Amino acid sequence: MRTIMMGLAMVAAMGGCATVGGGVNTSNHGIWYQDCGVARPIPGATATFKGTLTSPNSAVATDDQQPPKSSNVKGVIRVIVPHPDTCNGRGVDLVELTEEALITPASTGPKMHKYRVESIPPSRWSE
């Protein structure tokens, strides 16, 4: 009987150790702005877009606002686009940017990179 009790105590202790400090790391999770549902993982090297969305399918960014090269997945730039007006200020979208043109203004303003924007379904965010 004593052996059985010791065995059960060991199993309980090991089970407790397995869960201490465990759980899901949500520091790299985003909440999809279209449904405000469960947070989904986003790769850690994904940058936040600093440019401007001109429409759901188009964006512009200056040279200073360019995403870093580390925000590249399979040769395509992927960035997080915050949607602060959704999901209690925590809504985001993960998009792929494809550069379409470099716009050089006639005035002294900065050059602008024009991008085609394609939203990534949350099921593919962790790619």
Image (tube, grey):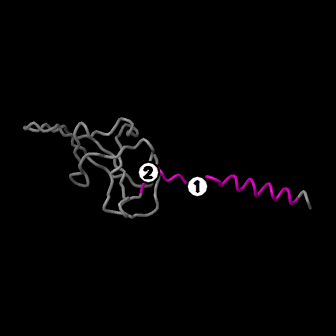
Residue at the image position 45 percent from the left and 44 percent from the top: 44
Q: In this view, which residue lies farthest toward the right?
A: 1
Reading the chain from its start, which is encountered first: label 1 or label 2? Answer: 1
In front: mark 1 or mark 2? 1
Q: Amino acid at mark 2?
A: Arg
Q: Nearer the viewer, residue 118 or 106?
A: 106
Q: Position of residue 34 (x, y in %)?
A: 36, 62
Tell me if residue 43 comes above or below residue 35 in the rendering. Answer: above
Q: Position of residue 68 (x, y in %)?
A: 34, 37
Q: In the image, is residue 99 part of the stretch drawn in magenta?
A: no
- Local secondary structure at mark 2: helix
Q: How would you rate the neighbour count of disc 1 (Cα within 10 Å): few for under 14, some for 14-19, many for 20 or more?
A: few
| Residue 23 circle label | 1
Tell me if residue 21 comes above or below residue 77 in the rendering. Answer: below
| Residue 66 circle label | none
Residue 44 placement, left or right of 24 = left
Q: Amino acid at mark 1?
A: Gly
Quadrant of the rendering where the N terminus is positioned: bottom right
Residue 116 placement, left or right of 75 = left
Is the Cβ of the residue at disc 1 closer than 8 Å to that at disc 2?
Answer: no
Residue stretch rendered in magenta on the structure: 4-30
Rounded to the nearest angstrom, the CA distance separating label 1 from label 2 is: 22 Å
Residue at the image position 24 percent from the left and 51 percent from the top: 53
Residue at the image position 31 percent from the left and 46 percent from the top: 49
Q: In the image, is residue 14 part of the stretch drawn in magenta?
A: yes
Q: Position of residue 4 (x, y in %)?
A: 88, 59
Q: How would you rate the neighbour count of disc 2 (Cα within 10 Å): few for under 14, some for 14-19, many for 20 or more?
A: few
Residue position for label 2: 124
Residue at the image position 44 percent from the left and 49 percent from the top: 42
- Local secondary structure at mark 1: loop
